[in-house]
Image (spheres, rainbow, N blue to C red):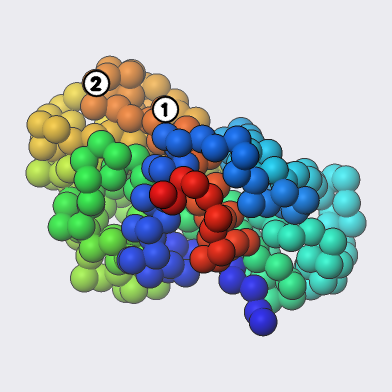
Amino acid sequence: MKPRHFISLLDLTGDELRQLIHRAITLKHVRDHHYQPLKGQVLGMIFEKSSTRTRVSFETGMAHFGGHALFLSPRDTQLGRGEPISDSAKVISRMVDCVMLRTHEHETVTKFAENSRVPVINGLTDREHPCQLLADMQTYFEHRGDIAGKTVAWIGDGNNMCHSYIHAAMVLGFTLHIAAPAGYLPDAGIVEQGADHVRFFDSAHLAAQGADLVVTDVWASMGQEAEQALREEAFKEYQVNAQVMAAAKPDALFMHCLPAHRGEEVSAEVIDGGQSVVFDEAENRLHAQKALLELLLCGDAKISLLND
């Protein structure tokens, strides 16, 4: 039987995503130290990009579940010496029970999954960041309930996070307002997929009007440092500040996947203010990914008292 992978948020149905979110909330609030469904199992973690939240959350999640996480980087393996991805996948997946990749090219993850005997998780690519969306959606559900029918404003770069927010809008049924400067719009193919759920605006203020959630990301992501000055100029009117948040609903939340640059994409008064839930959001990487690991590796065979 082919393993189930998590490459994109679209790999989950709306019902599955909601069940996963509610399971993550349960795992967060009821820690059963005797529940170790992944005892003796190993998660291979392949990092081509540096990480804080992704590495810590997956390692900790595996430890909580009685398993082990194995850190692999191209510098330390044959991946960095030109071994074909297909060969690496066939070898590694014979030795571990699940693989998480945080890499540049989206094709690296899809090709690895095609050749893997075990579930593969997309920990981030330049195209999508679905694990972050699990945490973001868990955070919204915790604070405000189901996001169906709500309005989310994405302000800034049409990057991998923006792409995954489009997918989330499709799966969970909310409307996504996008404000991004010309030349930095999200991928046209992904926009076409989510056309019924996406609207574009010429300014951050317009996109935020009536929003239940306002989200942004850094102007220059990893690998784009050489473009910093160019991007600062392009995005200077796209900062999430108090004026932008004032256009949203009074109880709107603010999210950012972190790390953040205060004074660039978000003002300090917003990210450190009362509407910001960025540290709940960061913590929920752990709980949402534990629920994901449980889904992929245990399926419906859960024996936890947490379900009682």
Q: Which residue is mark 1?
A: 279
x, y percentage for residue 151?
18, 51
Q: Is residue 294 above or below residue 192?
A: above
Residue at position x 17%, y 43% in the image: 212
Residue at position x 75%, y 53% in the image: 41
Is residue 88 found left or right of 64 in the rendered image?
Answer: right
x, y percentage for residue 279?
41, 27
- Residue in the foreground of this view, choosing between 298 and 17: 298
x, y percentage for residue 223?
61, 43
Residue at position x 34%, y 73% in the image: 193
Is residue 19 found left or right of 242 in the rendered image?
Answer: right
State which quadrant residue 240 falls in. top left
Quadrant that contains the N terminus: bottom right
- Residue in the foreground of this view, choosing between 81 and 71: 71
Q: Quick check: can you spot residue 254? A: yes
What SS does tag 2 mark? Answer: loop
Please name the amino acid that badge 2 sits on: Gly
x, y percentage for residue 62?
66, 44
State which quadrant residue 106 falls in. bottom right
Q: Is residue 17 above or below residue 144?
A: below
Specify the label residue 97 is tagged with.
Answer: none
Q: Residue furthest bottom?
A: 1
- Per the model, the C-alpha gap separating discs 1 and 2 is 12 Å
Q: Residues within 10 Å of mark 1 (few under 14, many from 20)?
A: some
Specify the label residue 274 is tagged with.
Answer: 2
Q: Residues within 10 Å of mark 2 (few under 14, many from 20)?
A: few
Please name the amino acid that badge 1 sits on: Phe
Q: Is residue 89 above or below residue 206?
A: below
